[in-house]
Structure formats: structure tokens, C-alpha cells
Image (cartoon, rainbow, N blue to C red):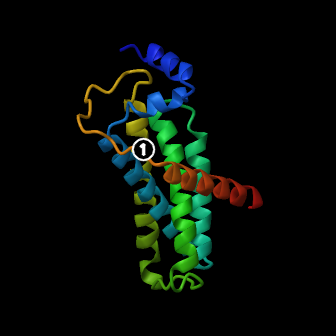
Amino acid sequence: MDIDFEKTIAMLSGESSENIELMQLSELDRIQITNALELIFQGLSLRNWLAGGILRDAWQNALDQLRDYVFAISINNAATMFARQATFDMRTTWAEKMRTAPRTNMPIHCPGDKKSDWEHNAEVKIQNGIDLLMHKINGFVSGAPNTKKETTISHVPSFQEIFDSRTAQERQKVREREL
């Protein structure tokens, strides 16, 4: 079916046309984008922590840097939209880890002779993650339907799941505004 027609039908049904584009991504695409974001986050966190300060601050700064990077991508397609959503999901996940992880108020303990190796490792992680992410984003042509149709029935969320999800999203928006 024509993607423009699918979007029109979705709008007629009161749905978001962006959801139609997101459905064009396969599960493998989503996993690869998420893995790329996590790799970038790991590298940014390590680089920030090596620059000084405590682990919690390194994580928070890395989340901010990742968000700024992903939202600066000028290509608008389903892969970019998913990367942006996944970035906010990561922020939620890591906010919880920052509250519960032990020793988040510690500086890094890096031997002086290994600091340059660790910094290089961080830069490699960041660059590899960016390369993977941009490869996925550039490889996805907006409007081109995914030829692999899933034959399994997907999980239909209950009202409570939708309500909990929306509540969590609203709380995240409030936290973002407070920062």
C-alpha cells in the first residue's frame, strides 16, 4: 500500500501519521539504533568521567550530549524519530540507575599511564556509535515500506499500560523542564 495513503488513513482514524513511519522499521533496525545510542553514551560517559568529577555527573552530561546530538540530526525519517524516542527512553532508564546505583559519587580511578588509552577507547566508542547510527539513518528512505511484514500478532497494550506510559512520559517532560 502507498505510504501517503496509509498516513491519510491513519489521520482519518485519529492516529498519528508518524506512527505509520515508525512501523516501517524492523525490530533489527530498532535494536541496532538502540545499540548505537548505547555505544555513544558509553563513550561519552567515559570521556566525561576521565575529564574529572563524579560518575553521576559524567552520566548526566553524557545523556545531555547524546540528546543534543540526536536532536541536531537534520535528516527526518522513521529511523531518526525512533532514535529520538530511544534517547528519551535511555534518559528515563539512566535516571533510575543514577538514583539506585552504588558509588555514583566517586571520581574515576585511572592509572596515569593508561589515561590516554582510556581516552582513545572513549573516542573510538563515540565514533563507532555515531557511524552505526548514521548508517542506519542514512540507509532508511522515508516513505519506503519495510518489505518484511511480521506475521505474529503484536501485543496490544491495555489501558493501564498506556496510562502508565503516558504518565511516565509526562513526568519525564516535567523533569526535563526543571533541569
Residue flagged by tag 1: what amino acid is it? Leu
Rendered residue at 42%/79% (across/down)? 114
User: Where, by quadrant of the figure, is residue 3 drawn?
Assistant: top left
Rendered residue at 43%/35% (across/down)? 137
Circle 1 crowding by C-alpha within 10 Å: few under 14, some 14–19, many from 20: many
| Residue 105: image location, x then y, percent | 60, 84
Q: Residue furthest left?
A: 151
Number of numbered labels in the structure image: 1
Tell me if I can see residue 177 in this picture.
yes
| Residue 60: image location, x then y, percent | 61, 66
Front-most of 90 and 110? 90
Front-most of 161 and 66? 161
| Residue 55: image location, x then y, percent | 56, 77
Drawn side of residue 171 relative to residue 151, left or right: right
Rendered residue at 45%/85% (across/down)? 111
User: Where, by quadrant of the figure, is residue 1 drawn?
Assistant: top left
The quarter of the rendered structure image containing the C terminus is bottom right
Q: Secondary structure at mark 1?
A: helix
| Residue 49: image location, x then y, percent | 55, 73
Tell me if I can see residue 66 in this picture.
no
Where does label 1 land, which residue? 133
